Image: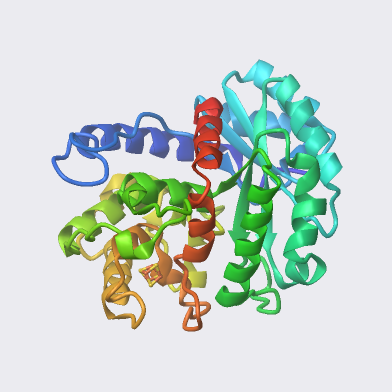
Amino acid sequence: MRNIIPVKDMMLIDQRVKEYYAWIKENVNTQDKGYFGKSGFTVDHHSYTFRFGNHSELPADMLDEIAGSCVSDFRVFSTAPSDEIHKFVDLRKRYPGSYYLEIIYDPVADKAQDIRDMIIDMRSHGILGYPEVLITQRLIKAFSPERFVEEALGPLGDIGTQLQLGRYTPSKTRGFKTSQVVSVDEEVEWMTAVSRGILDRKYDIHPIPIGEYAVTFLDEYNEVEAIGLDGRIDEKLLPEPEPFDIDNVRRKTKDIFLSSLYIDHNLDLHVWSESMGQHVLDRNFGFEPLGNVRDRPIHEFITEPNGVMNKMLNEVIRNLVTNRKCSGCRYKSFCASHAIPLFRKWQQDDGKHCYGYLPVIREFQSDRPFLRNMVDGFKELGF
Ligand code: SF4
């Protein structure tokens, strides 16, 4: 068993990432306008997430290769449920820093109690992490929302864990299988009922990304002003939306894209979307790589006027302003930064609901103590 990327390529990746982080601090953190910059947020660290592998299966010397070549204060490894936490505990002793495990949790095959035991074991050794559940036809057929809340989440309901919910998208590694795709309407309705179940049972679970979206709408879009007497958002009371300033939205979306990138085993670089489902925006979504880190520093090809990055941004904006549902919608700027229009390449959201997942967001917005607890949980993660 060995790493898919040879160590000398990993070291080149590390060199490119470090150059890029220096460029971001010098050029993006200092800009006057944008999501990042003098008057907004700043990028204050870089981290590595090692994805698409069951890293707990790797022998210690292979884990050493990864941690030793890609140096950062924060390292995230993906893994199937495992009782081999000791590998990461030992690795952390050799390569110190904050370690997180993203546990690929399939409730059809895995037991919630095992996930719970794993998280508690990890924490006792200073390693944090959370389960990630992919929403597939297989999952929603096996689990009604009630059963999912009861059986798949119940044993995790008192340990204050994040829960990442992800949308299934066909890809090369999945053999471009479309049989597991869940329609947006089915997904929104299933997730809305799951959200209600989590709140009714007062689970100490922090659902991402939808819980974060609920907080963003309340705070940054001032929706806190629209809370009605029953504690729920009354859409009639929503504040006047800000005018859709294309240049501003494009700039902010670009900053979000610039801060989340994925390098594949060919060393091709792509945008990594942190929206529902966490996707590499690559040829599966109709985009060529932004460039190859073997050839040039990252900042050179992402700033090219006719480069892939600019084509993606053009497409996001064009789709939002022309789409029947989105053109008149107040959430266009939010949906731009989550690359939502690009998901329409695989499936249109032309039914009752859309990729904005508003009914799910509204459920979480109805329980502010739940959201406050979730935000405190994020702070504890320190990342
Ligand atoms: S995807 Fe939905 S929420 Fe987002 S802009 Fe379009 S209509 Fe609005």
Q: Residue furthest front?
A: 229
Image location of residue 36, percent across then percent down: 26, 41
Please say which color scheme the image uses. rainbow
Front residue of 382 and 4: 382
Q: Is residue 233 left or right of residue 26?
A: right
- Quadrant of the rendered image containing residue 85: top right
Q: Is residue 169 visible?
A: no
- Quadrant of the rendered image containing residue 236: bottom left
Q: In this picture, is 77 found above or below 165?
A: above
Image location of residue 357, percent across then percent down: 49, 64
Q: Is residue 24 visible?
A: yes
**Ligand 1 occupies quarter:** bottom left
State the residue at coordinates (47%, 64%). 358
Query: Which quadrant does the N terminus fall into?
Result: top right
Image location of residue 283, percent across then percent down: 48, 70
State the residue at coordinates (53%, 51%). 364
Q: In this picture, is 112 found above or below 142?
A: above
Q: Is residue 219 left or right of residue 36?
A: right
